[in-house]
Amino acid sequence: MRFLILVLFIILLAFTFWPEQPTPTAEESFIGPQLEPLKKAEQFEQDYLDAVDKKNQRMEEQSDGG
């Protein structure tokens, strides 16, 4: 009986002090290559929205000035 308690205690200590493995980010995991096209698409969308904003701003300036 003492042996069983000792083994359980050792397992508990080992579990408590075992070093925690760092969690990999999505880019470091197997899904990383699939994220590259998504990031490119997000950048393209942001560039498009910026261009639309600039165009709308120019249109407002022209309508106010004329």
Image (cartoon, rainbow, N blue to C red):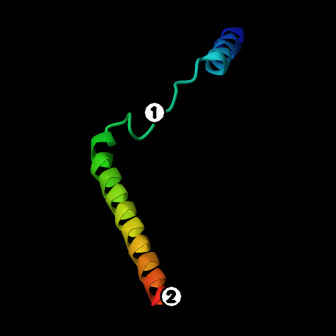
- As drawn, 66 above or below 54: below
- Which circle marks residue 32 in the picture? none
Location of residue 45 in the rendering, given as x and y in whole percent from the top left corner: 35, 64
Amino acid type, label 1: Pro
User: SS for tag 1?
Assistant: loop
Q: Is residue 48 rendered to the left or right of residue 11?
A: left
User: SS for tag 2?
Assistant: helix
Residue at 52 percent across and 27 percent down: it is 22
Q: Name the foreground residue: 4 vs 20.
A: 20
Q: Quickly name the residue at label 1.
A: 24
Q: Is residue 57 rendered to the left or right of residue 44?
A: right
Q: Quickly name the residue at label 2.
A: 64
Indicate which disc, 1 or 2, sits on the residue closer to the N terminus. 1
Residue at 31 percent across and 58 percent down: it is 41
Residue at 50 percent across and 88 percent down: it is 64
Dividing the picture into quarters, in which one does residue 20 lie?
A: top right
Location of residue 23 in the rendering, given as x and y in whole percent from the top left corner: 50, 32
User: What is the number of callouts on the image?
Assistant: 2
Amino acid type, label 2: Asp
- As drawn, 22 above or below 30: above
